[in-house]
Each structure stands twice: as structure tokens, then as C-alpha cells.
Amino acid sequence: MLLRSVRTVERLCNSASSSFLSSPSSVHRSSGGLRNLLRRATTGNVVGSAFSAPASRCCSSSVCVSSRNEDELRSEFTESELRRFPSRAPATVRLVKSRRKARRRTVVGAAETAYSAIELALDSVVKIFTVSSSPNYSLPWQNKSQRESMGSGFVIPGRKILTNAHVVADHTFVLVRKHGSPTKYRAEVQAVGHECDLAILVIDNKEFWEGMNSLELGDIPFLQEAVAVVGYPQGGDNISVTKGVVSRVEPTQYVHGATQLMAIQIDAAINPGNSGGPAIMGNKVAGVAFQNLSGAENIGYIIPVPVIKHFISGVEESGKYVGFCSLGISCQPMENAQLRNNFKMSVEMTGVLISKINPLSDAHRVLKKDDIILAFDGVAIANDGTVPFRNRERITFDHLVSMKKPNETALVKVLRDGTEHEFIISLKPLQPLVPVHQFDTLPSYYIFAGFVFVPLTQPYLHEYGEDWYNSSPRRLCERALRDLPKKAGEQLVILSQVLMDDINTGYERLAELQVKKVNGVEVDNLRHLCQLIEKCSDENLRLDLDDERVIVLNYPFAKIATSRILKRHRIPSSMSSDLLSEQNTATESVACAA
């Protein structure tokens, strides 16, 4: 079948039109069946490998070499070159022949890769239809309008489907359709890891699993290895294959989860709808397509197998997503010789300088600011913060930390005041003071006397628009990005808006300020603020805000005004469901004790 396809390529090369040359670096096509896909994959479009010739050379030379004679090969060299080196002409012809044969093997190899990817994909890759509704952080008691989106996924062992977290984020309803079937099946989201942008779906309907095969996870591909991305991108309804090569392997910012994890850059086009589809190398999965580079052409990223395995193993062991560990420190490179001398580093020593430590991390117990981290688990850290990775490649040592399981320990070698020390540090996922994302959960809020209190989150700041960094309140933005928590459960509670009423007239300009104290008691989080206000026994309620601003309310009148304001604005409850359930639990406990 494959040899017959290659001969077809040979027959078509002489009459190939310019349309075959329009996409020399990638291939993107829909399938009308296995035979149609294979025919397209072997008629000149699959030339994405960096080792193959450009498309124009491929069609005119590398495939059709068998139909050209020695005189035609000689004609590619100038007459002056042949006159100057007449004895080398036969050798030159042999060299050209060998190069063209190598190019022909590249095209055949590309066709085999495409054929293998398509054959595996037909019984494994599925199309996912999601209906989602995101929270409205400006009006936290209601959701935004629902929207429909589509993505891809593939079957993994255990009758599960792996896809991207952003494909099913804030979902209300999920359907899955397999290749060649008109039927959509209801799916449930078993686990979601928004940091690593992965999710697992399960389908109870046994009919769906008939004829479905799972894909096996492979290894991290080397640079310039060919991969085929399979999925259902926009522009069509059928399955599609995009071929490219590996360009780079390094930690990359995951857009969805705003985290830094290892990713693989490829030159295959990854478009909306491709998300969640497998990147196949040979007969195994090399990664999961999840994002592209905005403003660039044919630069896509796939999630590598180590990140996928870390996510899946965590779900299998604990039944839920466990997250990725962090050492809880911020570091500075030690590339300046004067800086190294100041910290008494010898010539052979390399490492990074600790500039900040998260108080909630175990590292805070043993490490100190201005310590030099020399090695992590016996792996020496360079002055730029990198460690060896594969063949002559380097990667930041954060990757070693992120691949640890929660509560695992690491041996950290540090230099302190010119003396080397070794510490055993327990690692765990750490939550920032201001959450970066809050998918699949409703925002918390508390309303009293028309004052709407919410915890500060980045999604709240995103309500200021795409340029939220510049358009949101500067003080809140700086705290969201820089401040660290001082104790567990801490939140920055802000007064987000004032629902106007007689009770709060004159306070409307105090919105977007942090609430520091309630009746002289420092506020730990929104739950604590709710408790302090609800249990107030004084006639007056005092709130201390940022900038030394003060709010004073007559408590009995404010309680009455709250009900009036809620009714006027059609707000179902004065507090979010999470605070309401805890308050009901506390009330029941008091009743039982009585």
C-alpha cells in the first residue's frame, strides 16, 4: 500500500501544480476515510521535516530521481565546473544521486509517520463538545451567558479519555463523538488539573467503547524528530492531521494555568479545536496539543509525557488532582563574578541565590535569604539556574522540583556564609496569596448594607479587560502578583463595589480598597470577615480599610437595609453558597450542643 502510494507520488510529481508548494512546513487536511487520508499524506504535502528538501525540490528531484539519467544530473552543475574538474564528474553525479535517494527516504518516512498516526487515530481520537458558563466576578452571584466550544481528546488505558483542562473548564455539559459515528455520548469529568492543562473524562455507555483502542504514552522526542498532531481543528468537522518536527524542549508558560512547566515546541500548526489531541511519534503518544504562539505561524506546543504521567499517576493514587510541587523560593542567577566572590563561592562552585522564601513552604524552616543553592538531589545547578538535560541540552532546575510527588523529600545542598550545608526538605504544592485562576467553582462573596466583599483573585482583575494589568487598580494588581501569604488560609478581602442605598450614602468612593479590620480585629479571609460582622454585638460596626479609610454603620439599621438592598437588586442570598453552608453547619453544631 505504501510503496504503491510512493509510485503514485512519482507519477504526479512532473505534473504537480503550485498548490502542492503552498505549505512546505506543515500539512493540514481533513479525512474522508483512511484511503483518502493516506493518499493525501503521500502526494507531496508531507514535507515538514527539517531534514527534507523544500517542496519544490522534493517534487522535481528527490522523488523522481529514478526517472532521470546521468546527463540530466550533470546539467545541474555549470559547464565551467565540469571543465575545471572533469575527473570528478562521475563522483559528483553519484553524490547527487545519493542525496536524492536520502531525500526520497525522508518523504517515504514522512508518509509512514502520517499513515501510522492516521491508523492509530481513527480508533482513538475523539471530538469533544462542551457547554460552559463562566462566573461573573463583577456580579459574583450570577454566571455569564453559556457558550459552546469544541476540542479533541484521545483514549488512554482504563477506558478514560485524556484532553485539555481548558476544553472542559467551567463546563455544564460535555458530549463526546468518536470518528465515523454520528452519535454523541454524555461524558463526565473525573479529574482536572488546570496548572498542567489536563483533564480526564469517563463515559459509562458501553456502546461507545466498542471498537475503541487506547493509545500508549511514549518518551520525550529529540530535536528534529517528526510528530503528527491529530485532532479536530476549526475549518472542518472531520479528523485532521498536522505534521511537524520538534523544535525545542524547555519549561514554558502554560497560558491556561499560568504555571511554568516543561513543554515541547513543534512547527506543526495547532489551531482552536486541536486542543487535547495527541501528538503521535511512531505508534506512541509524544504529547498533548494545548497552545500556540500568538502572532507567529506554525509554532505550537504540546504537553510532554512526564507531565502527563505525573498528572495521571496523581489521580490514580489519590482519586483527585494533586498538583505540582514547589520549593517555595525565588532565586537570582549568580553569573556575575563579583557577586560570587561576595558570597565566598570558590571557582568550581555554581548555584543560585535565594532572594525570597514562601512562609508556608518547608524550605522556610531550614533555608535563609542569601543562601546559595548548589545542588538539588545531587544534581549540580549552574549559575544560570539550569541543570543537564539529555544530550547537551539544559533545563531550569524547577523541572526537577515540579516532577516530585506531594510530600516527597529532596536533598538540597546550600552554601551559607562560606560553609556548605545539606538539608532534607519536604515538597508540596503551594497556593499563592491571590489565586491565579478559579475554574469550575463559583466565586465567594458577602454582602452587608450594600457593601460587596470578595477575596482578591486574578480572575476578578481580568474583569477589567484584556489590558487588566494597566487598567485595574495598581495597588491591587501589585499585591496580586508579588505578595506572599503569611499564614494558611489567608486572603486579601476587598470592598469590590457599593450597591447604593440610604444606609451607605457617602461611602460609594471607597470601592476597590482592602478591608483591614472589623471592630479592631484583623481580617484573615472572607469567611472570617463574615463571622465578625454576623456576630457583631455592638451598636456600631466599624470597618478599617486601606489608606486609613473608615466605615461606620449602625448595626441594627444595616441589618434591615441588607434585606431591602438584596430584594431591590434581585440577589438571592447575602453570601455565596460556600459561606452559607459553613454558617448552617455552625448553627447546627450550636443547636446540638444546646
Image: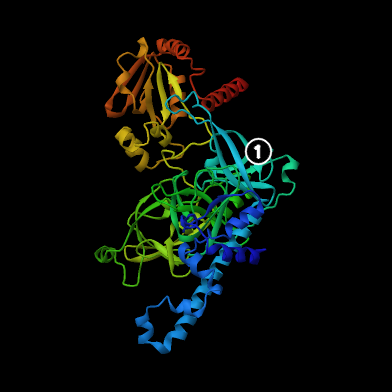
Quarter holding the N terminus is bottom right
The residue that mark 1 highlights is 187
Q: Nearer the viewer, residue 272 or 435?
A: 272
Amino acid type at mark 1: Ala
Q: Nearer the viewer, residue 410 or 297?
A: 297
Expressed as whole percent of the image width and height from the top left, the position of residue 195 reads 49, 46
Q: In screen coordinates, is 548 left or right of 254?
A: left
Q: Nearer the viewer, residue 325 or 464?
A: 464
Q: In screen coordinates, is 341 left or right of 92?
A: left
Q: Residue furthest bottom?
A: 87
Q: In screen coordinates, is 272 left or right of 558?
A: right
Q: Is residue 578 above or below residue 300?
A: above
Residue at 61 percent across and 52 percent down: it is 313
Q: Is residue 217 something that shows in the picture?
A: no
Q: Is residue 287 above or below residue 592?
A: below
Residue at 62 percent across and 57 percent down: it is 38
